[in-house]
Every structure is written in C-alpha cells, then in structure tokens.
Image: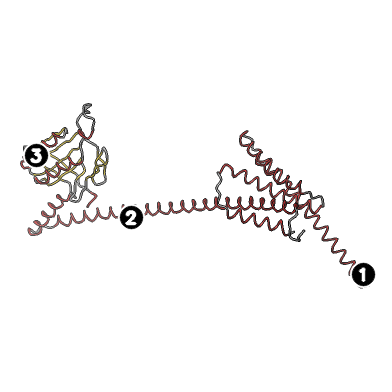
Amino acid sequence: MWLPLLGLLLGLGLGLLSDMQIPVIYQNYLSIAVLAALDTLLGGIRAQLQEVYDDKVFVSGFFFNVLLAAGLAFLGVHLGVDLYLAAIFAFGVRLFQNIAVIRRILLVRYDERKKVRKTTNNHKII
Amino acid sequence: MKRFAFTRKQFVVLVVCITAGFIIGYSYNLTKEERMMTIANLQDYEREDNYREQLIDQQERNKQLTTELHEMTVAIRDYEKKMVDADYEKLVAQADDLRLLLGSISAKGKGVRVTLADADYNPANVNPNAYIVHESHVFTVINELKIAGAEAIAVNGQRLRTNSYIRCTGPVIVVDGKQFPAPFTIEAIGSNDSINASLNLRGGVLDQLLHDNIVVTVEENRMIEMVANKQGM
C-alpha cells in the first residue's frame, strides 16, 4: 500500500528538482502525457478495488497510453488537425469515470462496514 | 523470501508510479517557470510605463521653466531699457556686448561667410577621407575666425556659444547636439579687415583646406544676420 505512494512522491521530487529544458513546441505533448499518466494511475486503483487488477495490463496501459497520446498529438500537429484534443477528451472522460467508480466502491464498502459493526454491536448487547 | 523484498508486481507498480510522479512534477515545474516569466514581463512593462510617465512629467516641467525663463529675460530687457541714467547706460551697453559674445541675443552686421564643401568623387583616390570635409577643418576655420576677432560665429545657422562643442559622427558633424551635413556654411560677424587678412594668409587656413581637396568659397563683406542661440540662455 505504501509502495506506490512512496514511488509517486519520489517521482514528484525528481520532477521538481530536475533542471532539464525542453522546447516550447513539445510542451503540448507533456501535458497530454500528464493526463495519460493520471488516467492510468486512477484506472489501476479502480481495477484494484474491483479486484480485476492485472499488472501486465496496468504497465502496458501506462506506457502505451502515454506514447499513444504523444503520437496522436504529433500526428495532429503534422496533419494540421488538433488530434491532441481527442486524447485530452478521451482521457478526461475516463478520468472522471474512474473517479466516479472508485467513489462508489468506497461508499459501498463504508456502508457495509458500518452495517457489520452495528450487527456485531447488537450481538454484544444481546 | 524476506519480508521487505520486492515482488515483481510491486516493482512494476513502483516504476510506473515514479514515472507518473516525474511527469507530473516536471510539468508543474515547467508551467511554474512560464508563469514566473509572464509575471516578470508584466513588471517590466509597468516599470517602462512608469519611466515614460516620469519623462513626460520632466519634459512638461522643462517646457514650463523655459517659458518662465523667456518671460524673465524679456522683463530684464524692459528693465534695462528703462535705465536712462548715463552711468547705467554704459553698463547696459556692456551687458549687451557680452550677450552678443555669448550668443544669447541675435546679431546683425558685416562679416564673412565661408562655405566648405566636399570635393567631387575622385575615382583615382580610393580613400574617401581624402576629399570630404572633416570636423577638424571646421575647427580650424572657426579657430582662425575667433583669433581674428569674430564676435559671433554660426555653423549652418547654428549660433556657437562659448561652451559649444563640435563632434564628428560619420558623414555628419554634430554642433551642440544637432546634426549638420556637408556643405558647412560658417558665418562670422566681426572686423572684416582682420578676418579677411587672417583667412588669406599665405600658408594659412585657406591654403591648408585647398591642400586637403576641399571646395572653399569665401564671401567677404556681407550683411549677415544671426539668430540667438536659445539653448544656453
């Protein structure tokens, strides 16, 4: 449980401390990569909660999504079509869906736990 | 297996999380830099605006002061004119003479006009410096005129004061901050005889100028009018 969080913090620290410069034209790709990464992370959490998590799917999804988004944006720039909008739209919609699913699962679990506690308490009283 | 050893699954998750964190952090860093740059730009604009306003204020104040100065000078003149006492009259005449030398009042009288012009383009001579008028030539003429007793001197209509300066800036010369191109007309009011004599000395100024391939025209005994130099009043 603590390991992914630690990794996230480590990565954040590295990113904040790194002093690399990239050309302005590539900053579009970076923003899409951020979206893709966030989407995949939340997707992983959702899968874990739904107990369908598979690490192969997770890892391949992460890198493939990031690359696909960047590639799409690249293609869009060269074709004169704003294809990166498609990526942003898709990832945005999925981000919200994933968060909604996670929220529902957590709510259901919380309710169940409450019920269980109540019943055990009742048993004690009786 | 030890308790803290990574399983493959954990390792993979760790790698993904580090990558995601890195991307997010890096992107945040870049955006922050951009934001800072925009803020710095805005500050620059504000400062520029501020300076411009200060400059405008200063210029307005200058204008106001110049008007005031002008009014005061006129008042002084009126005051001097009212002096009828013989003693004071002498002093007033002396003050007028001094003002004439300073160039702060307009002058009118007989004098000479010396015109220095560049020689025609000479294909045989590669160096153009050999046939154009330099500020040193203007200097020599002015110095000679001053030595010969000229009371008022003007270059291309710009009256010279005691603290005037002449500077060479490429193809033009700068007299008290104003640019003048060739040909240069140097006018002098003063004792005609001495000025003519000194200019025409054998081996003197004119000979030197002619030797430097400059087209010199001297008009003697002309009525010359000069405006005052308002800059140094």
Q: Position of residue A44 (x, y in %)?
A: 75, 51
Q: Which numbered mark, 3 or 2, is in the foreground of this view?
A: 3
Disc 2 residue type? Answer: Arg
Q: Position of residue B12 (x, y in %)?
A: 72, 51
Image check: A92 left or right of B173? right
Q: Which of the pair A94/B190 is nearer the observer? A: A94
- The residue tagged 3 is B204
- The residue tagged 2 is B61
Disc 3 residue type? Answer: Gly
Figure check: A77 above or below B102 = above
Q: Which of the pair B204/B222 is nearer the observer? A: B204
Crowdedness near tag 3: few (<14), some (14–19) or many (≥20) residues, C-alpha within 10 Å: some
- Name the disc covering residue A123, or none: 1
Query: Is disc 3 in contact with disc 2, using a CB cutoff of under 8 Å?
Result: no
Figure check: A75 above or below B96 = above
Figure check: B198 above or below B118 = below
